[in-house]
Amino acid sequence: GVHYIAHILKHRQKPQTMKHQAIAYFGDTTLSFHYTVSDMRSLGKQTREETVRLEGNTILE
């Protein structure tokens, strides 16, 4: 399961096939990458909105 996958990702292996399979597993099976990307986009949007609301850093707007 997850512990085995984490173990694979910790090691520097050549070829990278096992790491690619582990990443594919997380992306396709657990959908954890999709969830993380979605959350990061949402948090980024909230941060930009709050910055505008507070009339803060125009670089971040």
Image (tube, rainbow, N blue to C red):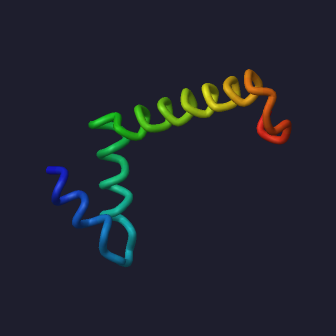
Left or right: 44 as drawn, with respect to 29:
right
The residue that appears at 63% across and 31% down in the rendered structure is 47
The residue that appears at 52% across and 36% down in the rendered structure is 40
Residue 43 or 58: which is nearer the viewer? 58
- State the image coordinates of residue 1 (x, y, percent, origin top left): 14, 50
Quadrant of the rendered image containing residue 20: bottom left
Quarter of the image with the C terminus is: top right
Left or right: 44 as drawn, with respect to 33:
right
The residue that appears at 83% across and 41% down in the rendered structure is 59
Residue 59 or 15: which is nearer the viewer? 59
- The total number of labels drawn is 0
Which residue, as the protein is rendered here, is positioned at the far right?
Answer: 58
Rendered view: 61 above or below 10: above
Rendered view: 1 above or below 28: below
The residue that appears at 31% across and 70% down in the rendered structure is 10
Which residue, as the protein is rendered here, is positioned at the far front?
Answer: 54
Quadrant of the rendered image containing residue 29: top left
- State the image coordinates of residue 17 (x, y, percent, origin top left): 35, 65
- State the image coordinates of residue 57 (x, y, percent, origin top left): 81, 39
Left or right: 17 as drawn, with respect to 46:
left
Rendered view: 23 above or below 31: below
- State the image coordinates of residue 49 (x, y, percent, origin top left): 69, 23
